[in-house]
Amino acid sequence: MNLTEAEIVELRQQANGRAVRADLARRARLILLLAEGLTWSAIRAKLDCNDSYIALWSKRFAADRLAGLFSRHAGRQRYKVTDRLEARVLARTTKHKPADGSTHWSTRKLAAELGGKPMRYIRKYNEQAKSVQWKYFDPTRRITPYSIITVH
């Protein structure tokens, strides 16, 4: 395996760094040992790994170079907020008060009331927050400088 000078420097930093994750350091050591020309059996003895480990990471490094050493996982699909869930959250927060007697809903109270899914809904709408414009149309109830306000 042929490495550039920059790759050798980076791999050595990853292999010997104290702030580097152990699995990434092990992969860096693997690539350095392959570049030195060691056999797979010698690498297995030094790193305490198996042939499939060596094959996987050497193949990923050959394909993507340094970027190939980072672990990947399939993950799962992002949770989609449905109209039904949105309606449940809005109905609960507009028509009911929290069970503890307070006047406002917190995200924790709402999540406890409806299960864990509302947190995803709240995060989604917090990303696209809209300002609230208050309107009060009854001019007789407005506070003016001439309003009578009593202080106790």
Image: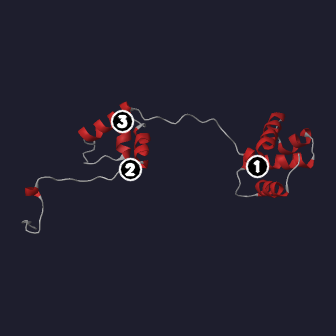
Identify the residue at image location x=88%, y=43%: 43
| Mark before the other along the chain sequence, 2 or 1 | 1
Report the front residue among 54 and 63.
63
Please tell me how crowded label 3 is: few (under 14), some (14-19), or many (20+) other residues with Cα within 10 Å.
few
User: Disc 3 designates what residue?
Assistant: 86
Report the front residue among 135 and 79.
135
- Residue 52: horizontal and vertical position, in percent? 81, 34
| Mark before the other along the chain sequence, 3 or 1 | 1
User: Disc 1 designates what residue?
Assistant: 66
Q: Alpha carbon of mark 2 to alpha carbon of mark 1: how far?
A: 39 Å
- Residue 117: horizontal and vertical position, in percent? 42, 36
Quadrant showing the C terminus: bottom left
Q: Alpha carbon of mark 3 to alpha carbon of mark 1: how far?
A: 43 Å
Q: Is residue 68 left or right of residue 111?
A: right
Q: Alpha carbon of mark 2 to alpha carbon of mark 3: how far?
A: 15 Å
The reply to whether the C-beta atoms of the residues labelled 3 and 1 are less than 8 Å apart is no
